[in-house]
Protein backbone atom coordinates (compact mmCIF):
# COMPACT_ATOMS: atom_id res chain seq x y z
CA UNK A 1 0.00 0.00 0.00
CA UNK A 2 1.16 3.58 -0.56
CA UNK A 3 2.81 5.81 1.98
CA UNK A 4 0.69 8.94 2.51
CA UNK A 5 2.67 12.16 2.99
CA UNK A 6 2.23 15.91 2.87
CA UNK A 7 2.05 17.05 -0.75
CA UNK A 8 5.30 19.04 -0.82
CA UNK A 9 7.43 16.96 1.56
CA UNK A 10 11.00 16.88 0.12
CA UNK A 11 11.51 13.19 0.82
CA UNK A 12 8.82 12.30 -1.75
CA UNK A 13 11.20 12.72 -4.69
CA UNK A 14 13.83 10.51 -3.05
CA UNK A 15 11.26 7.81 -2.35
CA UNK A 16 10.00 7.92 -5.93
CA UNK A 17 13.57 7.60 -7.20
CA UNK A 18 13.74 4.32 -5.28
CA UNK A 19 10.48 3.22 -6.92
CA UNK A 20 8.54 3.47 -3.65
CA UNK A 21 4.86 4.30 -4.06
CA UNK A 22 3.94 7.57 -2.36
CA UNK A 23 0.46 9.08 -2.37
CA UNK A 24 0.09 12.79 -1.70
CA UNK A 25 -2.69 13.95 0.60
CA UNK A 26 -4.72 15.54 -2.19
CA UNK A 27 -5.09 12.24 -4.03
CA UNK A 28 -5.58 10.21 -0.87
CA UNK A 29 -8.43 12.45 0.32
CA UNK A 30 -10.40 11.86 -2.88
CA UNK A 31 -10.07 8.07 -3.01
CA UNK A 32 -13.09 5.83 -2.64
CA UNK A 33 -12.50 2.23 -1.62
CA UNK A 34 -14.53 -0.85 -2.44
CA UNK A 35 -13.82 -4.56 -2.68
CA UNK A 36 -12.04 -5.77 -5.80
CA UNK A 37 -13.82 -8.27 -8.02
CA UNK A 38 -11.42 -10.98 -9.17
CA UNK A 39 -12.34 -13.78 -11.59
CA UNK A 40 -10.28 -16.97 -11.72
CA UNK A 41 -10.48 -19.43 -14.60
CA UNK A 42 -8.94 -22.53 -13.08
CA UNK A 43 -8.05 -25.10 -15.75
CA UNK A 44 -5.60 -27.10 -13.63
CA UNK A 45 -6.72 -30.70 -12.94
CA UNK A 46 -6.43 -30.48 -9.14
CA UNK A 47 -8.97 -27.72 -8.55
CA UNK A 48 -8.80 -27.51 -4.77
CA UNK A 49 -5.02 -27.49 -4.57
CA UNK A 50 -4.76 -24.73 -7.19
CA UNK A 51 -7.50 -22.75 -5.45
CA UNK A 52 -5.53 -22.90 -2.23
CA UNK A 53 -2.31 -21.78 -3.93
CA UNK A 54 -3.90 -18.77 -5.61
CA UNK A 55 -6.08 -17.68 -2.72
CA UNK A 56 -3.12 -17.89 -0.36
CA UNK A 57 -1.32 -15.30 -2.51
CA UNK A 58 -4.34 -13.09 -3.14
CA UNK A 59 -5.09 -12.92 0.57
CA UNK A 60 -1.66 -11.52 1.43
CA UNK A 61 -2.85 -7.97 0.82
CA UNK A 62 -4.80 -5.35 2.79
CA UNK A 63 -7.13 -5.00 -0.21
CA UNK A 64 -10.47 -6.75 0.13
CA UNK A 65 -11.18 -9.05 -2.79
CA UNK A 66 -14.27 -10.93 -3.90
CA UNK A 67 -13.18 -14.00 -5.87
CA UNK A 68 -15.40 -15.74 -8.40
CA UNK A 69 -14.29 -19.03 -9.95
CA UNK A 70 -15.40 -19.46 -13.55
CA UNK A 71 -15.72 -22.68 -15.52
CA UNK A 72 -15.47 -23.23 -19.25
CA UNK A 73 -18.73 -24.40 -20.82
CA UNK A 74 -16.94 -26.34 -23.55
CA UNK A 75 -14.50 -28.25 -21.35
CA UNK A 76 -15.08 -31.73 -19.92
CA UNK A 77 -13.67 -31.60 -16.39
CA UNK A 78 -12.47 -35.15 -15.71
CA UNK A 79 -10.68 -34.66 -12.40
CA UNK A 80 -13.40 -33.04 -10.31
CA UNK A 81 -16.92 -34.00 -9.33
CA UNK A 82 -19.70 -32.22 -11.19
CA UNK A 83 -21.45 -31.26 -7.95
CA UNK A 84 -18.27 -29.46 -6.83
CA UNK A 85 -18.20 -27.45 -10.04
CA UNK A 86 -21.89 -26.69 -9.79
CA UNK A 87 -21.50 -25.45 -6.23
CA UNK A 88 -18.33 -23.38 -6.47
CA UNK A 89 -17.80 -22.48 -10.14
CA UNK A 90 -19.93 -20.27 -12.36
CA UNK A 91 -20.18 -20.96 -16.11
CA UNK A 92 -18.54 -18.25 -18.15
CA UNK A 93 -21.64 -18.02 -20.34
CA UNK A 94 -23.58 -16.74 -17.33
CA UNK A 95 -21.03 -14.03 -16.55
CA UNK A 96 -20.47 -12.42 -19.92
CA UNK A 97 -22.33 -9.28 -18.88
CA UNK A 98 -20.20 -8.82 -15.74
CA UNK A 99 -17.13 -6.64 -15.21
CA UNK A 100 -14.11 -7.61 -13.14
CA UNK A 101 -11.23 -5.63 -11.74
CA UNK A 102 -8.83 -8.49 -12.31
CA UNK A 103 -8.74 -11.97 -13.77
CA UNK A 104 -6.33 -14.90 -13.45
CA UNK A 105 -6.18 -17.72 -15.99
CA UNK A 106 -4.18 -20.71 -14.82
CA UNK A 107 -1.97 -23.10 -16.67
CA UNK A 108 -3.23 -26.41 -18.04
CA UNK A 109 -1.57 -29.75 -18.89
CA UNK A 110 -2.11 -29.34 -22.65
CA UNK A 111 1.23 -27.82 -23.72
CA UNK A 112 2.02 -30.54 -26.22
CA UNK A 113 -1.32 -30.11 -28.00
CA UNK A 114 -1.61 -27.47 -30.77
CA UNK A 115 -3.78 -24.60 -29.61
CA UNK A 116 -6.51 -25.21 -32.18
CA UNK A 117 -6.80 -28.85 -31.07
CA UNK A 118 -7.47 -28.01 -27.41
CA UNK A 119 -11.17 -28.76 -26.91
CA UNK A 120 -11.92 -25.40 -25.28
CA UNK A 121 -9.69 -23.22 -27.49
CA UNK A 122 -12.53 -21.38 -29.23
CA UNK A 123 -14.16 -20.52 -25.91
CA UNK A 124 -10.87 -19.42 -24.41
CA UNK A 125 -10.27 -17.11 -27.38
CA UNK A 126 -13.74 -15.68 -26.79
CA UNK A 127 -12.85 -15.04 -23.14
CA UNK A 128 -9.57 -13.37 -24.09
CA UNK A 129 -11.38 -11.01 -26.43
CA UNK A 130 -14.15 -10.42 -23.87
CA UNK A 131 -11.58 -9.51 -21.22
CA UNK A 132 -10.40 -6.49 -23.23
CA UNK A 133 -13.63 -4.65 -22.40
CA UNK A 134 -14.64 -6.38 -19.17
CA UNK A 135 -11.43 -6.81 -17.13
CA UNK A 136 -9.02 -4.13 -15.95
CA UNK A 137 -5.97 -6.41 -15.77
CA UNK A 138 -5.47 -10.12 -16.51
CA UNK A 139 -2.68 -12.37 -15.25
CA UNK A 140 -1.86 -15.39 -17.42
CA UNK A 141 0.06 -18.24 -15.78
CA UNK A 142 2.26 -20.75 -17.65
CA UNK A 143 0.23 -22.34 -20.49
CA UNK A 144 -2.32 -19.53 -20.30
CA UNK A 145 0.48 -17.03 -20.97
CA UNK A 146 1.52 -19.03 -24.03
CA UNK A 147 -2.08 -19.04 -25.23
CA UNK A 148 -2.35 -15.28 -24.71
CA UNK A 149 0.95 -14.63 -26.51
CA UNK A 150 -0.36 -16.58 -29.47
CA UNK A 151 -3.86 -15.08 -29.49
CA UNK A 152 -2.95 -11.43 -28.96
CA UNK A 153 0.52 -11.25 -30.51
CA UNK A 154 0.86 -14.19 -32.90
CA UNK A 155 3.83 -15.60 -30.95
CA UNK A 156 3.62 -19.39 -30.96
CA UNK A 157 5.04 -21.78 -28.38
CA UNK A 158 7.79 -24.23 -29.25
CA UNK A 159 8.64 -27.66 -27.81
CA UNK A 160 11.60 -27.95 -25.46
CA UNK A 161 14.21 -30.69 -25.79
CA UNK A 162 13.14 -32.01 -22.41
CA UNK A 163 10.75 -31.01 -19.66
CA UNK A 164 11.77 -27.85 -17.84
CA UNK A 165 11.27 -28.71 -14.19
CA UNK A 166 12.84 -27.07 -11.18
CA UNK A 167 13.49 -23.78 -9.42
CA UNK A 168 15.49 -21.33 -11.50
CA UNK A 169 17.35 -18.11 -10.90
CA UNK A 170 15.87 -15.03 -12.58
CA UNK A 171 17.27 -11.57 -13.16
CA UNK A 172 15.26 -8.39 -12.89
CA UNK A 173 15.64 -6.38 -16.12
CA UNK A 174 13.38 -3.40 -15.41
CA UNK A 175 13.68 -1.78 -12.00
CA UNK A 176 11.50 1.32 -12.26
CA UNK A 177 8.29 -0.64 -12.76
CA UNK A 178 5.22 -0.88 -10.52
CA UNK A 179 4.79 -4.62 -10.97
CA UNK A 180 8.32 -5.34 -9.77
CA UNK A 181 8.48 -2.90 -6.86
CA UNK A 182 10.56 -4.41 -4.08
CA UNK A 183 11.94 -7.26 -6.21
CA UNK A 184 15.49 -8.36 -5.57
CA UNK A 185 17.87 -8.09 -8.52
CA UNK A 186 18.01 -11.90 -8.49
CA UNK A 187 15.10 -14.11 -7.38
CA UNK A 188 13.82 -17.65 -7.83
CA UNK A 189 10.69 -19.12 -9.37
CA UNK A 190 9.50 -22.66 -10.19
CA UNK A 191 8.88 -23.95 -13.71
CA UNK A 192 7.22 -27.11 -14.91
CA UNK A 193 6.53 -27.31 -18.63
CA UNK A 194 7.37 -28.96 -21.94
CA UNK A 195 7.09 -25.88 -24.15
CA UNK A 196 8.35 -22.31 -24.17
CA UNK A 197 8.06 -18.95 -25.91
CA UNK A 198 11.04 -17.29 -27.59
CA UNK A 199 12.36 -14.23 -25.76
CA UNK A 200 13.68 -12.94 -29.09
CA UNK A 201 10.18 -13.00 -30.58
CA UNK A 202 8.78 -11.23 -27.53
CA UNK A 203 11.42 -8.50 -27.85
CA UNK A 204 10.50 -7.94 -31.49
CA UNK A 205 6.97 -6.95 -30.47
CA UNK A 206 6.92 -3.23 -29.54
CA UNK A 207 3.82 -3.79 -27.43
CA UNK A 208 5.55 -6.18 -25.03
CA UNK A 209 8.22 -5.74 -22.35
CA UNK A 210 10.24 -8.43 -20.59
CA UNK A 211 10.62 -7.43 -16.95
CA UNK A 212 12.51 -10.50 -15.74
CA UNK A 213 14.10 -13.55 -17.31
CA UNK A 214 16.25 -16.58 -16.61
CA UNK A 215 19.33 -17.78 -18.48
CA UNK A 216 17.94 -21.31 -18.23
CA UNK A 217 14.17 -20.85 -18.22
CA UNK A 218 13.87 -17.87 -20.58
CA UNK A 219 11.50 -14.90 -20.40
CA UNK A 220 9.60 -15.11 -17.14
CA UNK A 221 7.65 -11.94 -16.40
CA UNK A 222 6.26 -9.97 -19.35
CA UNK A 223 3.69 -7.17 -19.64
CA UNK A 224 2.07 -5.33 -22.47
CA UNK A 225 2.83 -1.63 -22.68
CA UNK A 226 -0.56 -0.74 -21.16
CA UNK A 227 -0.08 -3.01 -18.16
CA UNK A 228 -3.41 -4.66 -18.94
CA UNK A 229 -1.85 -8.08 -19.52
CA UNK A 230 0.67 -9.77 -17.22
CA UNK A 231 2.32 -12.91 -18.60
CA UNK A 232 3.93 -15.21 -16.01
CA UNK A 233 5.85 -18.00 -17.74
CA UNK A 234 6.24 -20.14 -14.66
CA UNK A 235 4.45 -21.18 -11.49
CA UNK A 236 5.11 -18.72 -8.65
CA UNK A 237 1.89 -19.95 -7.03
CA UNK A 238 3.28 -23.47 -6.47
CA UNK A 239 3.41 -24.80 -2.92
CA UNK A 240 6.78 -26.07 -1.67
CA UNK A 241 5.77 -29.70 -2.34
CA UNK A 242 4.17 -29.28 -5.79
CA UNK A 243 7.22 -30.14 -7.91
CA UNK A 244 7.86 -33.10 -5.62
CA UNK A 245 4.33 -34.38 -6.13
CA UNK A 246 4.71 -34.01 -9.91
CA UNK A 247 8.07 -35.77 -9.90
CA UNK A 248 6.88 -38.80 -7.92
CA UNK A 249 3.67 -38.92 -9.98
CA UNK A 250 5.76 -39.23 -13.15
CA UNK A 251 8.03 -41.79 -11.50
CA UNK A 252 4.94 -43.83 -10.69
CA UNK A 253 3.86 -43.64 -14.33
CA UNK A 254 7.24 -45.02 -15.44
CA UNK A 255 8.19 -41.82 -17.28
CA UNK A 256 11.70 -41.77 -15.80
CA UNK A 257 11.67 -38.01 -15.16
CA UNK A 258 14.76 -36.02 -14.28
CA UNK A 259 15.02 -34.74 -10.74
CA UNK A 260 13.70 -31.12 -10.65
CA UNK A 261 16.67 -28.77 -10.82
CA UNK A 262 17.73 -26.72 -7.78
CA UNK A 263 14.82 -28.12 -5.80
CA UNK A 264 15.63 -31.04 -3.52
CA UNK A 265 18.55 -30.46 -1.11
CA UNK A 266 21.65 -32.04 -2.71
CA UNK A 267 19.36 -33.10 -5.60
CA UNK A 268 18.19 -35.95 -3.38
CA UNK A 269 14.46 -36.71 -3.83
CA UNK A 270 14.44 -38.37 -0.41
CA UNK A 271 15.01 -34.98 1.23
CA UNK A 272 12.29 -32.41 1.89
CA UNK A 273 12.43 -29.45 -0.53
CA UNK A 274 12.48 -25.91 0.78
CA UNK A 275 10.71 -22.95 -0.81
CA UNK A 276 13.00 -20.33 -2.35
CA UNK A 277 10.27 -18.36 -4.09
CA UNK A 278 7.52 -17.65 -1.53
CA UNK A 279 8.60 -14.04 -0.89
CA UNK A 280 8.78 -13.26 -4.62
CA UNK A 281 5.39 -14.89 -5.26
CA UNK A 282 3.65 -12.88 -2.55
CA UNK A 283 5.22 -9.65 -3.77
CA UNK A 284 4.27 -10.32 -7.39
CA UNK A 285 0.60 -10.92 -6.55
CA UNK A 286 0.32 -8.02 -4.11
CA UNK A 287 1.94 -5.68 -6.65
CA UNK A 288 -0.43 -6.89 -9.35
CA UNK A 289 -3.47 -6.37 -7.12
CA UNK A 290 -2.36 -2.92 -6.05
CA UNK A 291 -0.77 -1.33 -9.11
CA UNK A 292 -2.30 -3.16 -12.09
CA UNK A 293 -5.77 -3.56 -10.60
CA UNK A 294 -6.62 -1.31 -7.65
CA UNK A 295 -4.78 1.81 -8.85
CA UNK A 296 -6.23 1.65 -12.37
CA UNK A 297 -9.69 0.08 -12.13
CA UNK A 298 -12.74 2.36 -12.28
CA UNK A 299 -14.61 2.85 -9.03
CA UNK A 300 -17.91 2.13 -10.73
CA UNK A 301 -18.43 -0.27 -13.63
CA UNK A 302 -21.00 0.37 -16.38
CA UNK A 303 -23.28 -2.36 -14.97
CA UNK A 304 -23.57 -0.44 -11.72
Image (cartoon, rainbow, N blue to C red):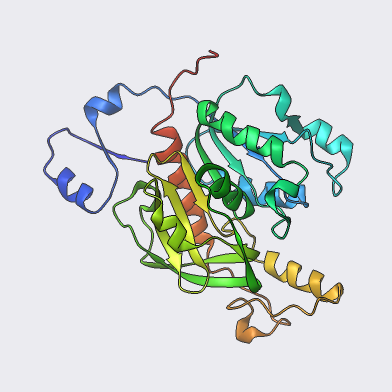
Residue found at x 57% / y 71% = 167
Q: Looking at the image, can residue 59 be seen? A: no
The image quadrant that residue 202 belongs to is: bottom left
The residue nearer to you, when weighing 209 against 171, is: 209
Lateral position of residue 267 relative to residue 184, left or right = right
Apparent side of residue 75 relative to residue 28 in the rendered image (left or right): right
Q: x%, y% of residue 86?
A: 83, 31
- The answer to which quarter of the image holds residue 185 is bottom left
- Quarter of the view holding residue 162: bottom right
Left or right of 60 in this view: 112 = right
* 137 up-or-down from 211: above or below: above
Q: Quadrant of the N terminus?
A: top left
Q: Is residue 226 left or right of residue 259?
A: left
Q: Position of residue 85 (x, y in %)?
A: 81, 36
The residue positioned 46% from the left and 56% from the top of the image is: 221
Residue 142 spot, x, y in % from top left: 60, 55
Regarding residue 167, the answer to whether it shows in the image is yes
x, y percentage for residue 232? 53, 54
At 63% from the left edge and 33% from the top edge, which residue is drawn? 127
Instruction: Identify which residue, 254 or 299, lies in the foreground.
Output: 254
Q: Residue at x 23, y 29 (%)?
A: 25
In the picture shown, does residue 295 fall above or below 253? Answer: above
* Numbered disc total: 0
Amino acid sequence: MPIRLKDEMPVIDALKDENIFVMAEKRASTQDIRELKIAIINIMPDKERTELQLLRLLSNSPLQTKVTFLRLDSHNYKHVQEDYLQKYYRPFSQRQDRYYDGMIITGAPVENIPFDQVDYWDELREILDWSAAHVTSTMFICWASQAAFFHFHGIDKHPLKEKLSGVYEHKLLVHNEDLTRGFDDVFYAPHSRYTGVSADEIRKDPNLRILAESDEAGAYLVTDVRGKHVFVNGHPEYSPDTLSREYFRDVGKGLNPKVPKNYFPNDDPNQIPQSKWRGHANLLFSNWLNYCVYQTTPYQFPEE
